[in-house]
Image: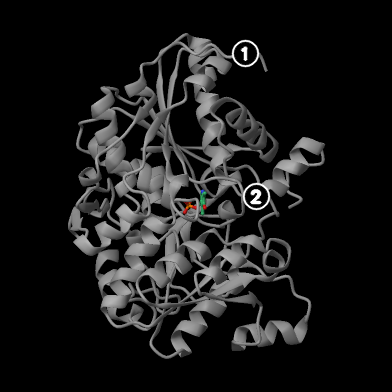
Amino acid sequence: MQALKPESAGASDVKILLDTEDLPKAWYNILPDLPAPFPPYLHPGTKEPVPPQAFEPLFPKELIRQEMSPNRAEPIPEELREAYFRIGRPTPLYRATRLEAFLKTPARIYYKREDLSPVGSHKPNTAFAQAYFASREGVEAYATETGAGQWGSALALAANYFGMKAKVFMVRVSYDQKPYRKYVMQLYGAEVIPSPSDRTNVGKKILAADPDHPGSLGIAISEAIEAAVTGTNTKYSLGSVLNHVLMHQTIIGQEVIRQFELADVTPDYMVGSVGGGSNFAGFAYPMIGERLHGRSETRFVAVEPVSVPSMTQGKYEYDFGDTGEMTPLVKMHTLGHTFVPPRIHAGGLRYHGTAATLSVLLDAGIVEPRAVDQLSTFEAGQIFAKTEGLIPAPETCHAIRGAIDLALEAKARNEETVIAFNYSGHGLLDLEGYRQFMEGSLKNNGNA
Ligand SMILES: *Cc1c(COP(=O)(O)O)cnc(C)c1O
């Protein structure tokens, strides 16, 4: 890599900061603005829409109300805003001048720093909201699942903050092989249980058939749901996919719109990685709302792994949200709930479906999907580390790959395109993938 001589962008354009009070006072709910009616969740037996009360054994009432809210704006309580201040919000928007110089592109590239939360990702934005509303309803414990631990550590942090217990079912291979986020969760006081476990009937059944079962996210979801339904004063929490979860993330994109105003730039593209869709939605939905009202011409690019291609290869149809068929049917882009994703390092992108609202936007052509392979994402991650100095999470590398590809396309057309992407998290607890990448042993289809 040659020496970098970035064209001077001016200090205010390199790092765009907001005042504490610029933190949004309401979330943006995209439901009333969707270009097609939201397809209701269906009961798998009767195929009838599931009434909201049916979710009460699982979720706090306020979150069920938010899930189907017709209101474009949902207020953020002051006590929760204070929690957001404490975990680092509002977050800065940076311009990647050193990456631009390396690519020799006329494009300008911006990125939103969602890695600056205590657990290193965007996930606390919803974890804090969920724990706040649950604790106000007197719920004492949350049960949830986690793969490599990004979601579990966010919920452990938030539950502890609002005086709740957290019970996290962690996929057993990750529990054994990726212990660091387990320690993070335990430090915050969470109980971390390797899944499959003997704590639930689902887990016991699986262990009886195979005592050494490595576990899967689908099994961990089923165990967490069972623990929530059978536990005293316990609810279930999900870190992505659901409408209220995506809505909680929209503080990201509202901050970004304010930051674009301050820097006087209009983005041509907004890019994000997609697992279930929460960081992409949080980043892009506020601007998508502007476009749906005819006030913006920004294009929106959602990036997924080639090996888990729910957006680019999945069918748009009703499917279960989990492997164990415990959830209602959700209309979404899906690879089928029995799809077994290859073990790529971007653990947060190994979900068989795409959030229902994002699926509506994909179907309407408002969001453009792209798929990238694992090797090219780690290459993008290393380029980013060497130019901008930050080591991205493997999930985030997908957004960076998408942004770099757009910047190279702009270069080929010699266009001053403005590209912004969501820097969803850091990769400092994911160095095993980088080790394999540097050694040359990383495979495109996953050998995590
Ligand atoms: C969990 C995670 C993702 C993927 O989940 P979404 O719900 O699609 O955002 C992306 N990046 C990071 C850093 C994550 O932790």
Q: Are marks 1 and 2 in contact (CB under 8 Å)?
A: no
Q: Earlier in the sequence, mark 1 or mark 2?
A: 1
Q: Amino acid at mark 2?
A: Asp
Q: Residues within 10 Å of mark 2 (few under 14, many from 20)?
A: some
Residue 137 position by quadrant: bottom left
- Location of the N terminus by quadrant is top right
Q: Is residue 254 left or right of residue 43?
A: left
Front residue of 21/132: it is 21
Say if residue 77 shows up in the picture.
no
User: In the depicted view, which residue is nearer to us: 438 or 319?
Assistant: 438
Residue 80, position as x, y percentages in the image: 27, 62
Q: Is residue 39 left or right of residue 120?
A: left
Q: Residue at x 27, y 45 (%)?
A: 35
The spot of residue 147 in percent (x, y) is: 60, 63
Is 388 rendered above or below residue 308? above
Quadrant of the image occupied by residue 263: top left
* Picture layout, residue 314 above or below residue 215: above
* Extreme residue toward the top, this view: 414
Residue at label 1? 3
Q: Residue at x 54, y 45 (%)?
A: 426
- Whether residue 390 sits left or right of residue 256 in the image: it is right
Count of number-bearing discs: 2
Q: Position of residue 6 (x, y in %)?
A: 49, 13
Per the rendering, the mark at residue 430 is 2
Label 1 beta carbon less than 8 Å to ligand 1: no
